[in-house]
Image: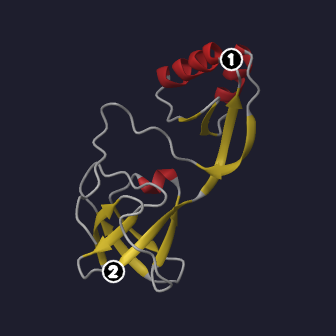
Amino acid sequence: MEIYTSCVQKDRTAGSDLDETVVLSFQRRQKTRQRVQTQGGQEITINLPRGTLMRGGDSLVSERGGIVHIVAACERVSTVASDDADLLTKAAYHLGNRHVSVQIGLGWLRYLQDHVLDSMLRELGLEPQRHSASFEPESGAYSFHSHSNASV
């Protein structure tokens, strides 16, 4: 079983038809030590430095030079949107105050689906839309997120 020990940022590895991909949820992309199965059926071991956060589009590199591309899985999420920046700022504050991971876009916020959070944001005047999408939240100001600087 091949062991993948480094994670490089998007666009740092050239893709080919021979490369494998692995689809991981946000929760799984936070785990630095795990076994997963690629889309092609190959079982691999991920053994990354502690604190590494894998993002969709990143690539794993094995000790032998193998490359596996990471795809962010579609997950059940809620998204709120508004042209009112003050309202979105309040929503972001309340979500952050509850230590909720939040993805931030221009005029919208996204979080993993939770009926309690949906209700809280409705009380603020927003209407959460439930759907399925990849989830790439902010890593935080004090995160230990690091990618390898190794060239492939």
- x and y, in percent, of residue 16 in the image: 46, 81
Q: Which mark is residue 84?
A: 1
Q: Residue at x 33, y 84 (%)?
A: 1
> What kind of residue is marked 2?
Gly
Classify residue 116 as left or right of residue 30.
right
Locate residue 48, reporting x and y percent: 27, 61
Provide the residue designation for mark 2: 66
Q: Exactly how many numbered labels are in the figure?
A: 2
Q: Is residue 113 above or below residue 85?
A: below
Q: Nearer the viewer, mark 1 or mark 2?
A: 1
Q: Residue at x 61, y 36 (%)?
A: 110
Graded by Cα atoms within 10 Å as few (under 14), some (14 to 19) or many (20 or more), the crowding at tag 1 reads few
Q: Earlier in the sequence, mark 1 or mark 2?
A: 2
User: Is 58 or 63 nearer to us in this picture?
Assistant: 58
Which residue, as the protein is rendered here, is positioned at the far bottom?
18
Asked whether 115 or 69 is in front, the reply is 69
Q: The residue under label 1 is which amino acid type?
A: Asp
